[in-house]
Image: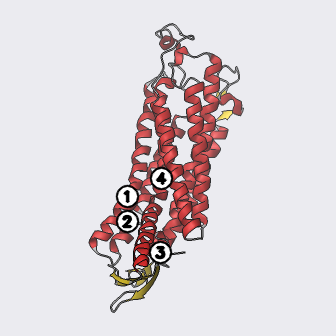
Amino acid sequence: MRSAPPEVVATWPKPNYIDPQSQGPDLIVAGLFTLMVALICLGLRLYIRLGVMRKTEMDDWVMVVATIFSAAATLSIVLGFAQYGWRHHVWDLTLEQLIAGRKASFVTQFLFIPATMLTKISILLSYLRLAPQNSLFRRLSLTAPWIIALATAAFWIVLFTECRPLTSYWNLGHAARDCIDETPVLFSYAIATVIFDFFVWALPLPTIYRINLPLSQRLALIALFSVGLCVVAAAAVRIHYLDIVVRQTYDVTWEGTHLWMWVAVEANLGIICGCVPWLKALVKSWRKRGDSSVTGSHGDTLGHARPDGMKTISSKGAFRMESLPGAQGTTGAREKGKYIDLESSYTPSEP
């Protein structure tokens, strides 16, 4: 926590412990709303994986754990705002409130760091469904999680070692308090997060653009995966408010409200973006079921030509795939002579 020098403290107004000025509910609204959307997106993803496809893989359960950490971090932020003085000016807080707020800050960072790490790892693992064997895309998707995990672990260790003893992090009045300047650490982690988020977003784009699909479909896929830019933007906004809190003001609780709001938004947006591809699969599943019920009620058979050279046959509600002359394969898209199973990667097969 940035401590104000005596000459700055002397300019502060008289403390108001009874009815202090408060920030509006923006933090609570943004944090809980993005958390709710993240939980809905994860629930729909699990519905597709468990209820429709009837199979899960490691990236699904990594995302579940990431969501648990993200939800806990969001609730910790809301609690810090509502109960521990994050919505008030620093001069209107008692020492006890400042200590409680620092404890909430430590807990939030403890939860936020693994939440964002696991989200990125889950997304990278999901790329393995798209990456051809022995491709650079696949090698990077396998290597990047280890780099992100090691870098994140380093920042996590620093969180526990920047103050000696650890309780000095929140015991602001402790006579023997010994803490390093946390500004370089906070900025290093924030910048690394932006870099990692941008890498995760950009990694699949060259492969998607080169696959053998109509340009409109390739652009649609790129747009689908580009929702990850929202996370990059949120991380960049967080750096802006971090700079204000640690370098431009001593009223860290009042100005920190916006910083904590973007911490919650960033963590939850990562979950949302990691689950968005499955929402497309859910729409396709519902559409297939609707088409199946229509054709089944008439008892006839309809043939639909597909852009990838396949033909969908529906008869009495049942679907099967038949290759047409000139088709490249079952459901794959070709890149450099190898098939990327784009369709089945994020689209459920009929149960």
> Is 227 displayed left or right of 40 in the figure?
left
- Figure quadrant of residue 200: bottom left
Q: Nearer the viewer, mark 4 or mark 1?
A: 4
* Vertical position of residue 46 compared to residue 32: above or below: below
**Label 4 belongs to which residue?**
272
Query: Which residue is label 2 attached to?
Result: 205
Asked if marks 3 and 1 touch (Cβ < 8 Å), the reply is no
- Disc 4, SS: helix
Q: Is residue 192 visible?
A: no
Q: In 3D space, how far apart are the residues under numbered discs 1 and 2 (Cα atoms)?
A: 9 Å
Instruction: Count residues near mark 1 (Cα–Cα under 10 Å), then give few for <14, some for 14-19, many for 20+.
Output: some
Give the percent coordinates (x, y) of residue 328: 37, 86
Around disc 2, counting alpha carbons within 10 Å, would you say few (fewer than 14), some (14 to 19), or many (20 or more)?
some
Q: Amino acid at mark 4?
A: Ile
Disc sitting over residue 226 in the figure: 1
Q: Furthest-left residue in view? A: 215
